[in-house]
Image (cartoon, rainbow, N blue to C red):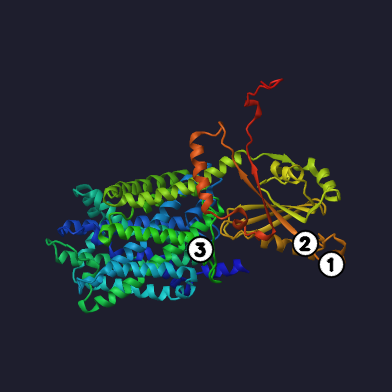
Amino acid sequence: MKATKLQDNHKLSLAGLLISLGIIFGDIGTSPLYVVKAIFNKGIIEKDLILGSLSCVFWTLTLQTTIKYVWITLNADNKGEGGILSLYSLVRKKAKWLIIPAIIGGSTLLADGMITPAITISSAIEGLAINNPTTPTTPIVIIIISILFLIQRFGTSIVGRIFGPLMLIWFTMIGVLGFLYVKEVPSIFQAINPYYAISTIISHPNALFLIGAIFLCTTGAEALYSDMGHCGKANIRISWIYVKIALILNYFGQGAWLLKHAGTAIGEQNPFYAIMPPSFVVYGVAIATIAAVIASQAMISGSFTLISEAVRLNIWPKVTIRYPSDHKGQLYVPSINLILYIGCMLIIAVFEKSSNMEAAYGLAINMTFIMTTILMCFFLARVHVPKIWIIIFALFYFTIEFSFLLGNFVKIEHGGWLTLLLASVLFIVMFSWHSARKIKNRYVRFVNIKSYFPMISELSEDTSVPLFASHLVYLTSANNKDEIESKIIYSIINKKPKRADVYWLVHVDVMDNPHTKEYIVEQLIPNKLIRIDFKLGFREEQRISLLFRKVVEDMVSKGEIDITSKYNTLRKHKIAGDFNFVVLEKTLTPTSDIRWHEKIILDIYKLLKRFSLSEEKGFGLDSSFVTLERVPLNIPDTKEVVLHRLDKPV
């Protein structure tokens, strides 16, 4: 039923087109607020630069956004879902090292989520200074961003319903304003000729800086792919036609205004507001602010979704994820909300004005574009696209994106260092968490569970051993049903024998599909040892306690298991036996076989563990039914110990 609803939402419809306008195109749709201003950077307005830069903008939107993302990348949908981690889930079996571009892409996308609210809302609010130059815009920006992050905990589904109509007003407004200027200077359409773009890039003395500024026109393309699950590729592709026309008209309208003022210094003027009639500026600022808030909201929501996927894929520490409303896909991650807010405030404190933020913007998201291209090459191979086309795709887009990266590198000394630093910190967190788990898994030893069947069966009936629980549940990482971690056997038999009427083994397999919710039950020892394998999509909440209870209820209703307590009094009244989850917290003892860089990773992992959820909370277990046991994964070999025994005391 849910799958049918999802498919219905993805069908081409007026509602789907409106949702696309409200959620998908917020970031790229607000780029006209600052792109042209960033290109001219307070300098002299030159005619050749006007045509050249507009030509670059037109062809960047065409090649990068339209062809790469809207036409090609949207085909890489994972059961209707998009985004770099969804793409990684489709290709991760191709090569283990693909986790690196996935982590880089995820961390740079999060860093972009910190600067997007700051630059878009600042650019919008600064329009107030046109009629009132003394207006302090920075405090207003801080207040708006603070309110935006504050309301996240309450859910935004109600606000989300009006995003589409509001963004329709926005795109219509920027398209009409641009058209009014374009019709006065129709010669501006010469810029469609790619000659002007190529000539400007080759001959302009500040070509690298120019490339970095032009890149800002397509920064929302990755968000366009990430949010595909909200409305489907058909609605995105059709609505993009309207969005692109509106964007091109506005960019060319700003270009027409620049042609009229060629030879003068642009100074602090923003061509976006300059093409508005003076009496309309106040309304324009209001609509721009609303559009900027919507773009910021889309980026924040996208960051929450990204982190929830990263947690399930074990590349981010387990954190609290809340569902503030019944609206599909509505997430709230308190820790990420705080991190993004602090990042926004830091960017505002360092740069203050949008013109300064432009120097830092683009570098991080440029890295995401490159990582997406790498993963897309493997996806195209997966769907059997001929190798020659994959090579052409790779060469073409690597050339474009590395050229943009070269231009964005110029921004490092002008503020790009901050977003690069933020992205690096996020990368270290993701890489350390993922790598530490791999290091720990290296020391996990598995044994053949079948050889323990007789002992487990006898222990269950051995009344000389106190009953630990009627039902004893262990979480196992063993993919093979015939294997089990040696530490679980140690916990049941050796550490302190644990008698139970029934032993349960629960295994969670994170699937490549986003919304899979399946399970398999196998009675390894009938009514004594039962294994449940949950197959959950990477976007599904891992509420193991609730899912386990549902499975047990289904088994009871089908007569597959009797969970009535074996205590005489309780059995007489048909009271169910108690359930106890045993969670094994695996620890590593520092030894010489752990390399120096692995020790650093493990130290970072220990630090992150302090801020992450415990194992039982991470799996949604009720702590009142959980026993936590610390077990060492590696015990130093006594063969290495040199010790001499004395016959008599000295």
The span from disc 1 to disc 2 (Cα, nearest Å) is 17 Å
Residue at image location 62% in from the left, 45% down from the top: 586
How far from the left and from the top, in percent, is residue 410? 27, 48
Q: Which mark is residue 574?
A: 1
How far from the left and from the top, in percent, is residue 247? 31, 66
Q: Which mark is residue 633?
A: none
Residue underneath mark 3 = 229
Residue type, mark 1 in image: Lys
Residue type, mark 2 in image: Met
Q: Secondary structure at mark 1?
A: loop
The C terminus - image quarter: top right
Residue type, mark 3 in image: Gly
Please state if 345 lies on the left or on the right of 260 as rendered.
Answer: right
Q: Earlier in the sequence, mark 1 or mark 3?
A: 3
Mark 2 residue crowding within 10 angstroms, few (<14) / some (14–19) / many (20+): some
Marks 1 and 3 close (CB-CB < 8 Å): no
Q: Nearer the viewer, residue 315 or 611?
A: 611
Residue at image location 47% in from the left, 71% down from the top: 156
Residue underneath mark 2 = 555
| Residue 77 visible (yes or no) | no
Q: Earlier in the sequence, mark 3 or mark 2?
A: 3
Q: Earlier in the sequence, mark 1 or mark 2?
A: 2
Q: Secondary structure at mark 3?
A: helix
